[in-house]
Each structure stands twice: as structure tokens, then as C-alpha cells.
């Protein structure tokens, strides 16, 4: 091919040779000049497209303010687990658990006579902590007000009593950190008190019934020396009853009879928990200061079980960001909080860290709602303790759906840029967190698309 091309060129005349080369050269020059006057392809194309077809992706590290807060009136009705007794923490002080519950007849009254011989209380304690070798007493008092399944009750409210109290019941020696099934002897007078008006031994949704006649019991645990803390469930059982009073007796013909009054009935009794927090009993060198103090930016914040202390997070940059982005569509790609954990390597260490933190957001109407990601499997507030250095331990909290809702709320402006970070009672342990100007502060990682 090369040889043929070479011979062909040499057969062209001189005038033909010039013409053949001049015309292509001129065309190439014109194309170069025209091309040099055009914009780059990407810019030229942009002039043909509307501005709405362009997006901007940006990442920011936003500022967060933290405060340690306490609110003693928290809704606590119809709990899955109830608590009795006291626990002490040198940082947080003393926490006391109590509960109120209705009783429910397991069977209808047969209309016959009944002479009480004995009364037993059967309880299934889900967990026991504290000084199990010390003496402890169960105290039960009749409540004066009817309680309802669909009413709100609060963890700090007072309980009106009739004045009738069952004589204190001794607890047996319990096994710590395990389930305890116990049987308690109760004064027989309590059985007679429940059965004193047989005409009220029925349940009805249409008229006054046993629940208006005997309205329920207020449960407390008394520990003269070192306390214990126990949990049980008065929620509807999944298998059989575990928590109930059994009244044993006989009729006029000495035929044995039993009446059972349930705490954990399938048709759930109305109940609510009570939590008392005394932060003043904490050790002087460890006592938490600046509770509910919005004028002080501490380097630490706290989260306490049983509706105790919680951390309020103020997302200070979101309001200004919302104003700057006004008129644009914003899609939140990532919004994540990283909350560093503090250990004292005495009481608070990696082995005691609660599994999860939870978040609620606030509205201008005073309502509080769980952040949508709470309870999901992706950065749902779980602790990240995978680092070889404990100083890197954090809680990861995904708040993308909340932030998107806040940025979209441009008309009613109901959602506030404020979050409450707290522990559930089932967390078991409290936690100390870094905050504000700590050497390792909270990180609020935010990535968004503007279009």
C-alpha cells in the first residue's frame, strides 16, 4: 500500500500538486478560525438548558449546642415494664421506681358463698439488681381514683389513696440479674376486702363494675438498708399469667374455691409508672451541675434512664441555612450526628454503655415526636465501639428525614430545630457525653443537593 501511494504522488504534475495542497489547507484554516470563536462545548450547551436542570452538591459540618435538661412530668401510662425500688449513681443521684395498676377478675363470680383461708401474690421479677441479701418489703395501697386505659398519666404525678393499705409483705432472698418467680403470703384480710361486695365482682364497659368498686393498687418497695431495684410486667402476657393475687377459700360445704385477680391480664389493666429522681444525693465531686441552665455551655451532657436527665440539642445552623436556601429545592443526602462518649473507667466504661440513644423533635405547639429514623437499622442511635481506641466511641444518629422535613416546613414553620436525646428505661445504664467546646465535640455532618 505504501509503495503504490508513493508512485501515485510522483505522477501528479506541478500545477496539480499546488492545487491539491492549497484547497485542503485553506479549509483547515477556516475551520480553525471558526472553532476558536466558539465557547467550550460544556458552556455552549449550558446556554441551551434551563437553570433548573443544574444541581449543586455541598457538604458542611454544622454547629450544635447541647444542654442537660430535666422534665419530671413525662407520659408513663400503659408501660410494657414496671419498676420497683431504688438505684443510686454517684453522678446522677437516687432514682426510685413505683407503679399503679388495676386488678382484673380472671373468672366471673359464681354467686356462692366464700370464706377466705389464705391469699397469695405471685410475681415474676424480670430482673433484680442491688443488695439482695438485705431485707425488703412490698407495700400496696388502695388508690382513690378510677384510672383508664385511654387517659394520660405522668411519671411524677401524685397518687390519691383511700387510706386502706395491705400490711407490708416480706420479700424472700432474691437472685440478682436473673428472672425470679416468687410467691408471697398476703394478709387474709385483703381477700375479704376484695370480696366484701359480691354484687360488684364483674366487668362491664357500660356500667360501674369491679374497677370502679376497687380502683387499683399503688405499689412501692421499702428497703430499710441498702436498696434493690426490680422489674416486672403488668402488660398483657404472650403465654400465661405471671403476676396475680390468688384468694383461696371454701364455701359453706367446705368445698375449696379459688378467686384470682390479675395484674397482667390479657384485657390489659390501666397502669402507669412513677419515677422519682433526687439529683441532690450525688457525690459532691461528681454531682451534675447546670441542669436546665440554657445560659451555660458545659463540655459534658448526660442521658439518664427512667425519664431522668436528657440532652437537648439545638441545631443552630439550620434556621440560617433554611433562610439562605429560600427559593431553592433542597434534597438532603446525609444528616448525621456523631455524639462522643465519656468514660471514667470506674462506673462508666465500654462494658456499661447503653446500646442506643433515642431522639424526639419539638414543635411550636409543644408536641414531641420521635425522629423518623429512631428504631430503624441504619444509624438509629446505636453505639459505635468498633475502634481500638475507646476515645473514638460515638453514638451515630441519622436525622436526614427530620432535617428534610424542617427545611420543607417553610409555610407553617411548626417544626423547631431542636432535638431531645434520651435513654429508654430498658437501657439499664446512664451515659455521659461530650458537648459544646469539648476537645472532641459533637459532629453534625450535612450533605445536600440544591436544584
Image (tube, rainbow, N blue to C red):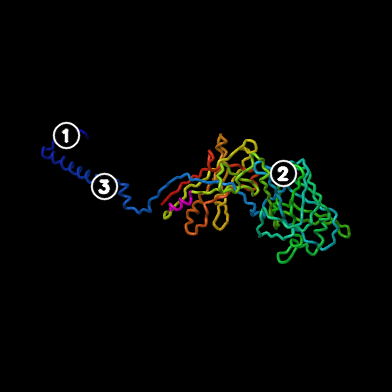
- Start and end of the magenta stretch? 317-325
Marks 3 and 2, the one that precedes in the sequence = 3
For label 2, count other residues whose C-alpha is less than 10 Å away and answer few (under 14), some (14-19) or many (20+).
many
Residue situated furthest right in the rendering: 253
| Camera-nearest residue between 431 and 286 | 286
Q: Position of residue 102 (x, y in %)?
A: 73, 57
Circle 2 residue: 128
Q: Which mark is residue 143?
A: none
Q: Quadrant of the N terminus?
A: top left
Disc 3, SS: loop
Is residue 103 visible from the viewing direction of this image?
no
Residue situated furthest bottom in the rendering: 206
Q: CA distance from mark 3 to mark 2?
A: 81 Å
Which callout, 3 or 1, points to the residue nearer the camera? Answer: 3
Seen in the picture, residue 208 relative to 427 is either above or below; the reply is below
Q: Quadrant of residue 114?
A: bottom right
For label 1, count other residues whose C-alpha is less than 10 Å away and answer few (under 14), some (14-19) or many (20+).
few
Q: CA distance from mark 1 to mark 2?
A: 105 Å
Circle 3 residue: 38
Q: Position of residue 278 (x, y in %)?
A: 68, 47
Seen in the picture, residue 163 relative to 124 is either above or below; the reply is below
Circle 1 residue: 7
Q: Quadrant of residue 128?
A: top right
Q: Position of residue 392 (x, y in %)?
A: 55, 37
Is residue 361 visible from the viewing direction of this image?
yes
Amino acid at each position: 500500500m505504501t509503495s503504490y501511494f508513493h508512485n501515485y504522488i510522483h505522477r501528479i504534475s506541478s500545477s496539480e500538486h499546488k492545487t491539491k495542497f492549497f484547497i485542503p489547507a485553506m479549509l483547515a484554516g477556516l475551520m480553525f478560525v471558526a472553532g476558536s470563536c466558539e465557547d467550550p462545548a460544556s458552556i455552549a450547551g449550558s446556554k441551551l438548558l434551563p437553570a433548573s436542570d443544574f444541581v449543586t452538591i455541598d457538604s458542611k459540618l454544622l454547629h450544635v449546642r447541647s444542654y442537660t435538661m430535666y422534665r419530671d412530668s413525662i407520659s408513663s401510662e400503659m408501660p410494657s415494664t414496671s419498676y420497683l425500688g431504688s438505684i443510686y449513681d454517684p453522678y446522677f443521684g437516687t432514682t426510685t421506681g413505683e407503679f399503679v395498676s388495676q386488678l382484673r377478675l380472671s373468672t366471673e363470680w359464681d354467686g356462692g358463698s366464700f370464706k377466705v383461708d389464705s391469699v397469695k401474690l405471685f410475681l415474676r421479677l424480670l430482673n433484680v439488681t442491688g443488695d439482695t441479701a438485705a431485707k425488703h418489703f412490698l407495700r400496696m395501697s388502695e388508690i382513690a381514683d378510677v384510672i383508664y386505659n385511654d387517659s394520660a398519666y405522668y411519671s411524677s404525678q401524685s397518687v390519691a389513696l383511700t387510706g386502706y393499705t395491705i400490711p407490708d409483705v416480706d420479700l424472700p432472698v432474691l437472685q440478682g440479674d436473673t428472672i425470679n418467680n416468687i410467691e408471697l403470703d398476703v394478709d387474709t384480710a385483703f381477700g375479704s376486702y376484695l370480696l366484701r361486695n359480691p354484687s360488684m365482682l364483674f366487668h362491664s364497659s357500660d356500667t360501674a363494675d369491679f374497677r370502679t368498686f376497687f380502683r387499683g393498687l399503688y405499689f412501692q418497695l421499702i428497703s430499710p438498708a441498702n436498696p434493690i431495684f426490680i422489674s416486672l410486667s403488668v402488660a398483657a402476657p404472650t403465654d400465661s399469667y405471671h403476676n396475680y393475687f390468688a384468694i383461696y377459700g371454701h364455701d359453706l360445704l367446705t368445698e375449696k374455691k379459688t378467686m384470682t385477680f390479675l395484674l397482667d391480664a390479657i384485657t390489659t389493666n390501666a397502669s402507669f409508672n412513677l419515677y422519682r429522681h433526687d439529683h441532690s444525693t450525688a457525690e459532691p465531686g461528681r454531682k451534675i451541675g447546670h441542669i436546665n441552665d440554657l445560659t451555660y455551655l458545659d463540655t459534658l451532657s448526660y442521658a439518664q434512664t427512667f425519664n431522668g436527665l436528657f440532652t437537648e440539642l439545638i441545631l443552630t445552623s439550620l434556621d440560617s441555612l433554611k433562610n439562605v436556601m429560600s427559593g431553592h429545592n433542597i434534597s438532603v443526602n446525609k444528616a448525621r450526628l456523631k455524639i462522643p462518649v465519656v468514660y471514667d473507667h470506674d462506673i462508666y466504661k465500654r462494658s456499661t454503655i447503653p446500646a442506643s440513644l433515642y431522639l424526639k423533635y419539638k414543635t411550636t405547639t409543644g408536641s414531641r415526636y420521635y425522629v423518623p429514623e429512631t428504631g430503624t437499622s441504619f444509624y438509629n442511635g446505636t453505639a459505635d465501639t468498633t475502634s481500638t481506641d475507646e476515645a473514638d466511641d460515638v453514638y451515630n444518629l441519622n436525622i436526614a428525614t427530620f432535617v428534610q422535613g424542617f427545611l420543607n416546613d417553610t409555610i407553617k414553620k411548626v417544626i423547631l430545630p431542636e432535638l431531645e436525646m434520651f435513654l429508654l428505661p430498658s437501657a439499664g445504664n446512664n451515659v455521659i457525653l461530650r458537648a459544646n467546646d469539648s476537645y472532641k465535640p459533637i459532629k453534625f455532618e450535612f450533605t445536600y443537593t440544591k436544584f
